[in-house]
Image (cartoon, helix red, strand yellow):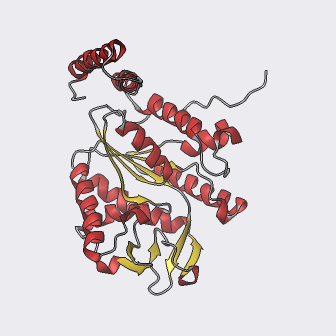
Amino acid sequence: MIRYNLNMQVPAALKAVNYTDTLIFSGSCFSEHIANKLKALNIHVNALPNGIVFNPLSVLEPFKRILGNTEFTEEDLLFHDGYWHGIYHHGSFSEITVSETLHRMNHALHQLKRDLEHASHLFVTFGTAYAYRLNSDNRIVANCHKIPQSEFTKQLLQSSQMEEACRDTFGHLQNQYPNLQIVLTVSPVRHLRDGISENLLSKSLLISLCHHLKNTMSGIDYFPAYEIVNEDLRDYRFFESDGAHPNAMAIDCVFEKFTGSSCNIVTKDYIRDIAAFNKLCAHKILKSGGEEYIKLMSAIEQKRAQLSALYQIDL
């Protein structure tokens, strides 16, 4: 029999997720995809406090700001092509005025701080060990925002540099929020623009970093998103046409592995039931007002009442 995957078994999480928990996701694309799926299931998620960012130092920046009780200021912005951009943020935070840009950045920062007060889990996804330094002041940026490459210097972050930053930030987070479970992942997205060999080098440094932190710090867990896509599935059927980004099938597979290993039994039942309810709500009927439409609306309301009572939630 031909094997199309390795049927990888993911160990149970150190701390199981419950559907009533507040979850925080930060970093690269794994965080975005999983967070969006959980949001669709009415689970409280704080996603991407500085947008999609890739290198570990930039991923950690919002948490360093909270620990240091400092907001983002105009010194953290660059002006290019009519917009103000954050050196620690994705372009989704960019605006045409300084005040609006900083308002959005610091609003997200304040929301992150509020959610950290009662969050059960922080999922941190690292995408690449390559980073860009701004030549004018040597600061590492999260995004170049299409500013000419001549204004930046690309570098491969050193293992010791990344480890020191993670230990410092995670250690202080654990001290301030003792109930917070930190889970590390490495994005399965291939950074092919860096080069194939260079991407593998980068990912190997990140995987090594995550495992070393897990093995030497208490309260740190690891979810193998990279390994599921690139070692278990390892087939271009599971990638978009660019050969770099996992497609919907791969994301669904990772999510299934994630819920199977990270969620408690009640939450697995909850996910099954809410997913079925969402599918029922998405059912399309060509014309409203007819008998079929009335039956569908009745079925939706009955199911809504049933699930709301069962799980003590508002749907």
Point out residue 170 in the picture as x, y percentages from the top left corner.
36, 56
Q: Residue at x 38, y 72 (%)?
A: 86
Residue 302 placement: quadrant: top left
Q: Residue at x 49, y 47 (%)?
A: 30
Q: Residue 266 or 309: which is nearer the viewer?
A: 309
Point out residue 65 in the picture as x, y percentages from the top left corner.
29, 66
Point out residue 11 in the picture as x, y percentages from the top left corner.
51, 32
Give the quadrant of the N terminus.
top right
Q: Residue at x 39, y 79 (%)?
A: 78
Residue 7 placement: quadrant: top right
Q: Residue at x 39, y 73 (%)?
A: 85
Point out residue 19 in the picture as x, y percentages from the top left corner.
31, 31
Q: Is residue 204 left or right of residue 131?
A: right
Residue extending farthest right: 1
Instruction: Work out whether 140 lies above or below 304.
Output: below
Instruction: Work out whether 265 lies above or below 183.
Output: above
Instruction: Work out whether 51 lies above or below 40.
Output: below
Give the quadrant of the C terminus.
top left
**From this viewpoint, is residue 4 visible?**
yes
Q: Residue 52 or 285: which is nearer the viewer?
A: 285
